[in-house]
Image (cartoon, rainbow, N blue to C red):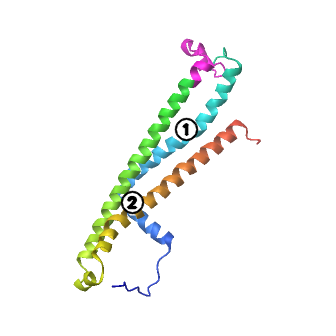
Amino acid sequence: MPEQHSAVPRPSSLKIYFRLLGYVKPYIGLFMLSIVGFVIFASTQPMLGYILKYFVDGLSNPEASFFASVPYLSEIPFLAHLKLLQTVPLLIVLIALWQGIGSYLGNYFLAKVSLGLVHDLRVELFDKLLVLPNRYFDSHNSGHLISRITFNVTMVTGAATDAIKVVIREGMTVVFLFTTLLLMNWKL
């Protein structure tokens, strides 16, 4: 049987999105940890660009000291002898490790939040289905109802958390890159 559509106006997508974000409240701690992870990830992008400057300098002058321009670090005997071409690859590996830690933390805790949202929405939807009258189940396909509980809820929460991930991670990357640009040469 065809579904009957009511004349009730549908809420806007932004309203639905903010309503969905309301379900994040029980998971705010995990959500904040994921933001910290994405900030760590975003902070590594300008680090790599900045380190590549030293790599290019090391190609033109392989015997140059990496810490020669840093006042306090150049006085430490072990660090004073490190050359650019020895230090830059090590720093790139450390930055990649730091980036991996940030990515892992951000994705792991956001996945925990996402799975918690899926669970909460499925429980709420199932509770609403339990109180519906029998005629509702007679007029609707059971496969469609199961799909709403399983697939649709997963897709909605996945889209919401992916949007948050992109906005936070890429937004912070832009902020860090712009800050690095200003620190390198603010006259640009």
Give whichever of 29, 144 is nearer the camera.
144
**Magenta stretch bounds:** 67-88
* Magenta highlight on residue 66: no
Q: Give residue 59's quadrant in the image.
A: top right
Q: Position of residue 15 (x, y in %)?
A: 48, 71
Q: Residue at x 73, y 38 (%)?
A: 185
Q: Position of residue 73 (x, y in %)?
A: 59, 20
Q: Is residue 165 left or right of residue 120?
A: right
Q: Secondary structure at mark 1?
A: helix
Asked whether residue 72 is in view, the answer is no
Q: Residue at x 30, y 78 (%)?
A: 141
Q: Is residue 139 above or below residue 162?
A: below
Measured Cα–Cα span from mark 1 to mark 2: 27 Å
Asked whether residue 163 is in view, the answer is yes
* Magenta highlight on residue 75: yes
Question: Which tag is nearer the camera, tag 1 or tag 2?
Answer: 1
What residue would you read off at disc 1? 44
What residue would you read off at disc 2? 24
Q: Earlier in the sequence, mark 1 or mark 2?
A: 2
What amino acid is at disc 1? Answer: Thr
Q: Residue at x 49, y 58 (%)?
A: 163
Residue 32's mark? none
Q: Secondary structure at mark 2?
A: loop
Quarter that holds the N terminus: bottom left
Q: Position of residue 16 (x, y in %)?
A: 45, 70
Quarter that holds the C terminus: top right
Q: Residues within 10 Å of mark 1 (few under 14, many from 20)?
A: many
Q: Position of residue 72 (x, y in %)?
A: 60, 20
Q: Is residue 113 above or below residue 183?
A: below
Give whichever of 139, 167 is nearer the camera.
139
